[in-house]
């Protein structure tokens, strides 16, 4: 009898230990009987869901957890898997006894007797509500970032969602600027005066939780603001608000620098819990993503809206400002000056682009000194500048034009050479000469050409009688129509070189017009005319078809040209029929879509018509690459880059001129390449003319090079000869071990 008592005691002891273990685990457990009714639940089940054992014993799991997600067929499948001895894991959305929503990960295992009859079902439950909330927060923040929501809105969203998770917390996000000072980004539950008091505070070893956290680049926990020395100079800010503790974590950039801080204020003396730490770790990643995306967008916007050479607003920014002042104004009143430098082409052609750029920078400085701060002065492109005189009438416009001519007329000293300078100016006055930006600009341009025809170095006000240019354009337009019909438009090709391997990566197809009587007519003259005359789409379709056909001919002839790039005007790119046109061309030539690059300019990017977005998406689906051309000249904009799936960016040739001896030019090119790396865009540098430029771009990591250093645009037969000569030259060069290794790496 004594042995039996001892055995029972051991059994009871083991059972007690087993129950202790089951009740102490963080997993809620329930067990059913043979009728699938709950027969046992552990303590964690009660603490997690609020149900006492008596509340659920005798009920089925389906009755307790609900069937909001799983149908009868789902349950049949689950039982089939359980009958095969499998463990079934599923996610269940349910509610606790108080009605609060929960997400559970449920693992089920069935037990059967030797005769195969069902005995028990064991369920193990993990609370995944917090993980779900974090996933929801991440989704919503990433969606806001992708939609280019302002940084303050993104940070406010993060703070509000965190405070909803943890009612005991007041959240705050601060940025650290270039001067190592704190700048409030979001604190929706703190009064505005709190942020104003912190704004501009220098970080340091004793600058509250956030200032110290940013200085240390490490988390700082202060459990008692009233007594902690870190808060000695600032405790008067949180204590009256009932905030007793603060935990601040650094927002670290990908390069290791501190971008800002993310702080939790508590109303009691305490530090963070494990749940707090889990959520904040996720928020820190979201914060740095939002900050770096915002800064990259700001750099892109700066490059997109300001001329890199002169620092003036470019054509895109001018258009935006003119729309505000004229198109969107109920009673616009201003004067517009269109200024073109006389004989600037001679400076470029005789002295080179470097001198020409220095010339333009000096002219821009002189123009700035004449106009008032509220006026707009912009580089319209090339040697053209546009000035909007806010609220000006004809007398002031005349006075400004005279002052501009006087300022420009002084010789420009460059590298010891004195260059004469003058300009021709056209003036329009709103509303007499037009009430919208397009009309005012067009009429000012007409007046400027009138000034040129009448001797240059002067100005003219627009007059309706100035129709000579319009007549000339009509005549040229008629000739262009004949040129399209008679096949006078042709394509020249300029090679593009892979910067890493030195191989030809493709060719850009460039439209050329040679009239039998007028001779060569430059693209910058006939392409805008084609857009005005409604011929641009016909020319564009010809260019697409001919470029792809030529690429096929090169294939058949054994010429290795991987891709061809074709310029597409904004008008054509917005045409919903463009994808179908491209598809037909590719089918007719048997080319894969990946061998065609479509180049677009700012007209597409700024307007961002829905049809353009749809076309871009469809072209990318076909494998066709989309390249943004002439970036940084005032003809390009990345302000809506997120709306168009651009895969390639072309650095304009104007960036190349000062690359060898101008730190600012090099810095801009470096910025563009780095931004493209972060956005995963291929970078093409056009206008490469020297070995030094090539070496700099190769070292920087630019993907593709294009320019006169390699070859000028040429007709297709000459291009094939150039390819053959290049191949022969490469084959004739001795292959050193170093060169052989380089070729292997390149391949």
Image (cartoon, rainbow, N blue to C red):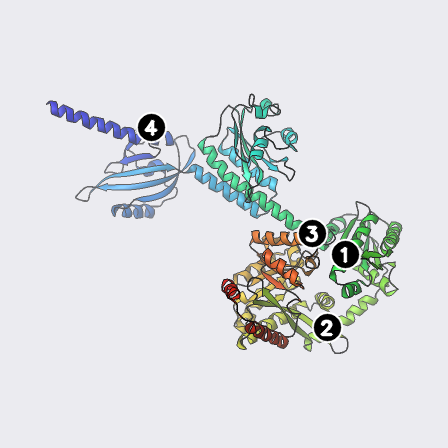
For label 3, the residue is 664
Give the spatial CA distance, label 2 vs label 3.
Answer: 41 Å
Q: Residue 556's spot in the image, x, y percent?
A: 53, 77
Q: Is residue 654 left or right of residue 554?
A: right
Marks 4 and 2, the one that precedes in the sequence: 4
- Nearer to me, 10 or 730: 730
For label 4, the residue is 52
Q: Residue 708's spot in the image, x, y percent?
A: 67, 67
Is residue 484 in view from this perspective?
yes
Q: Residue 312's spot in the image, x, y percent?
A: 74, 51
For label 2, the residue is 480
Q: Are marks 2 and 1 in contact (CB under 8 Å)?
A: no
Is 247 drawn above or below residue 515 in the view shown? Answer: above
Q: Which secondary structure, mark 2?
A: helix
Q: Which of the two discs, 2 and 3, sits closer to the camera?
A: 3
Is residue 649 in view from this perspective?
no
Count the numbered circles shown: 4
Tell me if mark 3 has few (under 14), some (14-19) or many (20+) residues whose alpha carbon lies within 10 angstroms of its own.
Answer: some
- Nearer to me, 72 or 445: 445
Q: Which secondary structure, mark 1?
A: helix
For label 1, the residue is 358
Tell me if mark 4 has few (under 14), some (14-19) or many (20+) residues whose alpha carbon lies within 10 angstroms of its own.
Answer: some
Q: Which secondary structure, mark 4?
A: loop
Q: Which of the two discs, 4 and 1, sits closer to the camera?
A: 1
Q: Quadrant of the N terminus?
A: top left
């Amino acid at each position: 009898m004594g042995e039996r008592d001892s055995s029972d005691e051991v059994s009871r002891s083991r059972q007690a230990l087993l129950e202790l273990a089951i009740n102490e685990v963080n997993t809620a457990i329930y067990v059913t009987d043979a009728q699938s009714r709950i027969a046992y639940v552990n303590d964690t089940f009660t603490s997690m869901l609020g149900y006492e054992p008596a509340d659920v014993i005798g009920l089925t799991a389906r009755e307790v957890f609900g069937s909001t997600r799983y149908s009868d067929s789902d349950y049949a499948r689950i039982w089939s898997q359980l009958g095969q001895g499998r463990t079934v894991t599923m996610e269940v959305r349910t509610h606790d006894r108080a009605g609060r929503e929960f997400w559970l990960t449920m693992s089920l295992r069935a037990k059967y007797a030797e005769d195969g009859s069902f005995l028990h079902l064991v369920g193990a439950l993990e609370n995944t509500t917090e993980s779900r909330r974090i996933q929801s927060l991440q989704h919503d923040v990433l969606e806001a970032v992708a939609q280019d929501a302002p940084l303050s809105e993104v940070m406010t969203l993060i703070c509000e969602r965190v405070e909803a998770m943890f009612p005991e917390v007041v959240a705050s996000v601060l940025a650290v600027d270039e001067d190592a000072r704190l700048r409030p980004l979001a604190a929706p539950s703190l009064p505005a005066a709190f942020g104003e008091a912190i704004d501009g505070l220098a970080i340091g070893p004793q600058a509250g939780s956030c200032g110290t956290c940013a200085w240390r680049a490490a988390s700082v926990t202060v459990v008692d603001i009233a007594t902690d020395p870190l808060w000695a100079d600032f405790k008067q800010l949180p204590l009256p608000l009932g905030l007793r503790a603060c935990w601040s974590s650094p927002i670290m950039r990908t390069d290791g620098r501190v971008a800002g801080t993310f702080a939790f204020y508590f109303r009691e003396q305490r530090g963070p819990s494990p749940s707090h730490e889990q959520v904040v770790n996720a928020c820190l990643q979201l914060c740095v993503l939002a900050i770096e995306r915002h800064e990259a967008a700001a750099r892109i916007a700066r490059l997109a809206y300001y001329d890199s050479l002169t620092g003036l607003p470019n054509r895109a920014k001018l258009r935006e400002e003119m729309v505000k002042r004229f198109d969107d104004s109920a009673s616009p009143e201003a004067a517009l000056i269109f200024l073109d430098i006389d004989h600037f082409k001679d400076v470029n052609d005789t002295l080179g682009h470097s001198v020409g750029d220095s010339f333009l920078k000096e002219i821009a400085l002189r123009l700035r000194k004449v106009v008032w701060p509220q006026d707009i002065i912009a580089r319209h492109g090339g040697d053209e500048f546009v000035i909007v005189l806010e609220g000006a009438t004809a007398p002031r416009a005349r006075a400004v034009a005279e002052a501009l001519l006087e300022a420009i007329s002084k010789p420009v000293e460059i590298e010891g050479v004195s260059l004469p300078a003058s300009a021709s100016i056209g003036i329009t006055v709103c509303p007499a000469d037009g009430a919208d930006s397009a009309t005012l600009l067009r009429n000012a341009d007409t007046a400027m050409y009138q000034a040129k025809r009448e001797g240059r170095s002067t100005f003219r006000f627009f007059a309706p009688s100035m129709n000579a240019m319009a007549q000339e354009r009509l005549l040229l337009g008629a000739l262009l129509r004949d040129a399209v019909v008679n096949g006078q438009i042709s394509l020249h090709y300029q090679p593009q070189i892979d910067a890493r391997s030195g191989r030809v990566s493709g060719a850009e197809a460039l439209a050329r017009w040679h009239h039998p009587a007028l001779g060569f007519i430059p693209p910058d003259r006939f392409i805008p005319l084609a857009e005005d005359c409604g011929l641009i789409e016909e020319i564009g379709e010809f260019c697409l078809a001919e470029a792809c056909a030529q690429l096929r001919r090169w294939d058949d002839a054994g010429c290795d040209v991987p891709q061809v790039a074709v310029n597409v005007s904004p008008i054509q790119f917005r045409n919903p029929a463009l994808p179908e046109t491209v598809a037909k061309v590719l089918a007719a030539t048997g080319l894969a879509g990946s061998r065609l690059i479509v180049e677009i300019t700012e007209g597409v990017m700024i307007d961002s018509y829905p049809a353009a977005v749809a076309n871009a998406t469809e072209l990318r689906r076909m494998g066709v690459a989309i390249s943004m051309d002439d970036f940084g000249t005032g003809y390009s904009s990345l302000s809506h880059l997120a709306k168009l799936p651009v895969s390639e960016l072309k650095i304009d040739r104007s960036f190349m001129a000062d690359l060898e001896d101008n730190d600012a030019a090099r810095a801009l090119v470096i910025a563009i390449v780095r931004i493209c790396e972060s956005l995963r865009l291929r970078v093409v540098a056009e206008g490469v003319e020297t070995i030094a430029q090539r070496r700099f771009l190769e070292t920087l990591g630019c993907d593709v090079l294009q320019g006169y250093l390699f070859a000028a645009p040429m007709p297709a037969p000459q291009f094939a000869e150039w390819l053959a000569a290049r191949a022969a030259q490469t084959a004739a060069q001795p292959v050193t071990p170093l060169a052989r290794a380089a070729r292997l790496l390149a391949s």
